Structure formats: C-alpha cells, structure tokens
Amino acid sequence: MQKQSFELIRGMSRRVKVHTLIHGGDAGKWKFFLTLKRRVRTILAENPGISIIHLNDGLMGFFSLPLRQITDLPIVVTLHGLDVVMPAHWFQTRIIPRFAAYDGVIAVSTATAKACLDRGFDPAKVTVVPNGVDTTLGDLPVVPNYRAVIGRRLGVDLSHKKLLVMLGRPVPRKGFNWFVRDVLPCLDPDVVCLHIGPSSATMGFKNFLLRLLPFDLGRQLALIFGMPTDEPALRRELAKPGMAGRAYRLGGLPFKDLIQTLMCADLYVMPNIKVEGDMEGFGLAALEAAICGLPVAAAEIDGITDAVQDGKNGILLPPGDAAEWARRITELLADPVRLKAMGRAGKEFTAANYSWEKMVDGYEAVFKKFV
C-alpha cells in the first residue's frame, strides 16, 4: 500500500498540482491522525485552487470523516479489501455506512468492489482501478548463480532442486501453513519451498499486548496491524521431521535480494485460502514475481483474480484443493521448456497491462468526474 501510494502521488504530480499530507515518521501516528483535521484546514486555506481530496486507504478514510465539517470539496477514498471486510461489528455498522457517503470510492479489485456493494454502497460511486507494478524490475541485472548465495545462507545445496517461492506475512488467509502441510508433501522430494516475509519477532511488544486482550479484539487489532499471526503454526510445520530439507523461511529480505530470489526460482506460489472476515485485496506480489519472469500459480480467490489472469500471466487454482495444486505444480515442474515460456509470456502480459502509469490513468479518470 505504501508503494502504491508513492507511485500514485508521483504519477499524478506529473499531470496536476498535488498537495500531500503523509505520516513521515517525524511524529507518532496518533498525533498525526488527531491533528489531521486542523492540518487539512490549513492546506485548504493556503491553496484555494484545490478541487478534490483523495484518501488512499480505509484508515485515512476513518480519521478523515470529520472533513465534511470543514469543506464541500468532493472526497474520494481508495479501499484495499480488509478496510471493507474487517470483522468488527462497530466497524461494519457505524463506519462502513459513512465510507459509503463519500463522493467516490476506488476499489483496487473487483472483489473489493463487490464487498463494497454487498454493504450497500451506491454502484455509481464505486470504480475499480487495479494496482500497478514497477515494470522495470524484470530488467534489473541478474546475479549469476544466485541459488548458491541462498544455499550458503541456508547451509544446503540447491543447485539441483526445484525452487518454489512464497512471499508475504504469514497470516491465515495467505495459506502458507496450508501449503506446507497439505501440498508440499505431495510434491517430488527435490522440490524446495522458500518463504519470504517478516517475522513476529519484530513485533514483540505488540504480540505481548494482544495476548492480554479478549480474543475477538486481539484478532481485529492483529488484522489492522497486519501481524504474522500464522507464524507459530507455520514454524510447527517446518519443524516436523518430514519437512527437513523441504521448506525454509528466509525472513524479511532487502528488496534487491528479494528480486534476485524471484529471478532464480522455478515457480511462484500464492496459495491463499478462504478466511472469514479477511481477504486478499489485490495480489501485487504475484505481479512482482511475473514481471521478474517467474511463472505464477495462484489461488482463484478474492482480489487475486484481478492481478493474475489465468493463462496470461499465471495459472489460477482452486483454493484449498491440495490434490489439484500438487497435480498442476508437478506438471509444470516436469516441463522446463513450457515453464520458461510461461514465465516470458507472463512478464510481457504484466508489463503491458499493469504499469503504474495505467493505474494513474485510472485514478485521473475518476478524479475528473468530480472536477
């Protein structure tokens, strides 16, 4: 979401005058939000030519509800998925109806738009504008034999292995634990799965606080913070004797190392599963893998289907169907020529259809409706 916001601001700034109000880490987040109304009033007073206000996620949408008291300018909010379906009664009954009252809503995927419409949003106000991806990632120079670099870090020889990569925070909807438990054992022994994503060790104090709260409240806060709540289950699966040499956690990686890992792997897997009260709003990681030339296998669920188009920049598989996942992955890995062709085609399709410039075009078209 931070990357999307950055690219949107940069792209719109080439076309119109943009005034930004961003939390830059110079003050606490609570202070930022509590002073939001006053700071917006100041910006509007100093810049009378402003003709529209855009809020780039549900959190900003929530704290910006009082803006109606100080301006009649049209306000458009972008919703990313979880900021629509969050399973809190107070949020669904008191906040979502007020989101629906904004002048316009941009949903990052068809699934997010449907979630809005299911909650009574006016269809005339809701527009789908998919996220983009940095199309230059696939042009970065490849580090020769990067598998050996990964292998030395893990203390294993990966030279003759088939490498699968999963990327993201280990939360239940991502399906990482399900994939390691139910799919990976059905694949050939030479298939190794690498998971890249942050560890809960970086959120120790937040974890401690959540354990002190009632379960429902703790779950809601964990969703808001994006905390890796499925990590303990994933670690237990990785610790089982049968998993020795089959799957590894690489933790959070610097971006350049992440890209090199994607470039040297054989297949990217996005094994999301259905989790009530949560959803994958889009699926940007799949686009990043595709733009690196890595074939993609993803679950046909939520907003992923707006990022991955079956047969064009990846394949879509039924969520939670371990037998079908194992069968299709085995078929792909058994045909290296087809796999390479799939990666090239996916890169070309993604570059042609998911650039940041296309995303900015979509936002500009929405903004022009109100200006």
Image: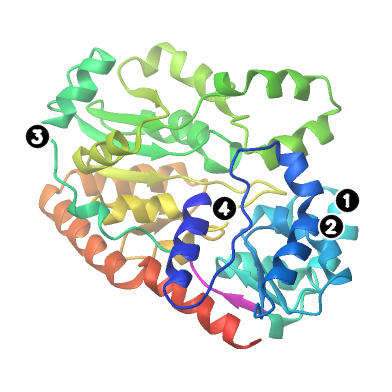
* Proximity of marks 2 and 3: CB atoms separated by less than 8 Å: no
Q: Secondary structure at mark 3?
A: loop
Q: Quadrant of residue 73?
A: bottom right
Is residue 316 positioned above or below 178 on the image? below
Residue at which label 4 appears: 280
Residue at which label 3 appears: 144
* Proximity of marks 2 and 1: CB atoms separated by less than 8 Å: yes
Amino acid type of the residue that numbered disc 2 sits on in the rendered structure: Gln
- Our reading of the magenta stretch's main secondary structure is strand
Which label's residue is closer to the chain start, 3 or 1?
1
Which label's residue is closer to the chain start, 4 or 1?
1
Q: Read off the magenta span.
A: 126-130
Q: Secondary structure at mark 2?
A: helix
State the residue at coordinates (46%, 72%): 360
Q: Where residue 322 sits in the image (x, y, percent)?
A: 45, 42
Which label's residue is closer to the chain start, 3 or 4?
3
Is residue 112 positioned above or below 206 on the image? below
Residue at which label 1 appears: 89
Q: Give the colour scheme of this rendering.
A: rainbow
Q: Residues within 10 Å of mark 4 (few under 14, many from 20)?
A: many
Q: Where residue 104 sits in the image (x, y, percent)?
A: 69, 77
